[in-house]
Image (cartoon, rainbow, N blue to C red):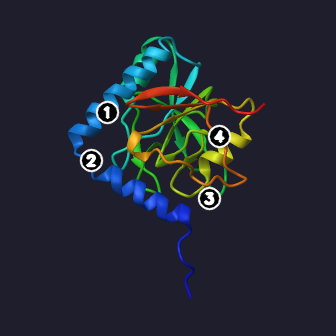
Amino acid sequence: MESPPSDREQLRKTMIAARRQLPPGQVQEWSARIVERLLGQFPAPPGDCIAFCWPIHHEPDIRAALEAWQARGATGALPVVTAPAQPLAFRPWTRDTPLEPDRYGIPTPVAGPWVQPDVLLLPLNAFDDAGFRLGYGGGFFDRTLAALAPRPLSIGVGFELNRVASIGPAAHDQPLDWICTEAGLTRINRPA
């Protein structure tokens, strides 16, 4: 007998469905606002290597921010799933980098050196004011943030419609340093 979905699984499905119902023009408009906010807060590259996620399922498209930071000397990077239940690895990305769909259908660089990000921009299926995010359920980013030393600056990027009172964080969930939406950019005050 299959167990019923957890509240987090249901929240994930509901939040992804809400975002996927956005008209493409709205996604573009809100994505442009997010890019403006990121570049307004971090006009200079916030690190030497800035990793982001290729936008899927109507996630914010922040490639314009990456290209602006690259023009100022930063290296862009995309995550690569190397094995199930392991931290992510990262390869450099530019507009000209050849990409192929990974096992999840996400465009990924298949060649190039491994790099360690100084900044990690993460998608938000759901998020709360404590800086916790709900991803797609694989735990890749939580494992990655826990494993990288030094830990990169983590910035959650999403739309306000995915803000919730609490995601119901689990012990393994890693809080973010910043949350950026079309409505603003917020520094998360985490306990030391």
Give the CA distance from mark 4 to mark 3: 22 Å
Q: Which residue is mark 4?
A: 175
Residue 13 visible: yes
User: Looking at this rendering, what residue extends furthest in the bottom direction?
Assistant: 1
Label 3 or label 2, whichever comes before in sequence order: 2
Rate crowding at label 2 as few (under 14), some (14 to 19) or many (20 or more) other CA atoms within 10 Å: few
Name the residue rendered at 38%, 25% in the picture.
35
Give the CA distance from mark 3 to mark 1: 32 Å
Q: Amino acid at mark 3?
A: Pro
Name the residue rendered at 57%, 24% in the picture.
49
**For the residues carrying marks 3 and 1, which lies nearer the camera in this image?**
1
Q: Which residue is mark 2?
A: 22
| Location of residue 156 with respect to 73 vertically, above or below | below
Q: Which residue is mark 1?
A: 30
User: In terms of image quadrants, where is residue 32?
Assistant: top left
Nearer-the-camera pick, 123 or 68: 123
Label 3 or label 1, whichever comes before in sequence order: 1
Q: Amino acid at mark 2?
A: Leu
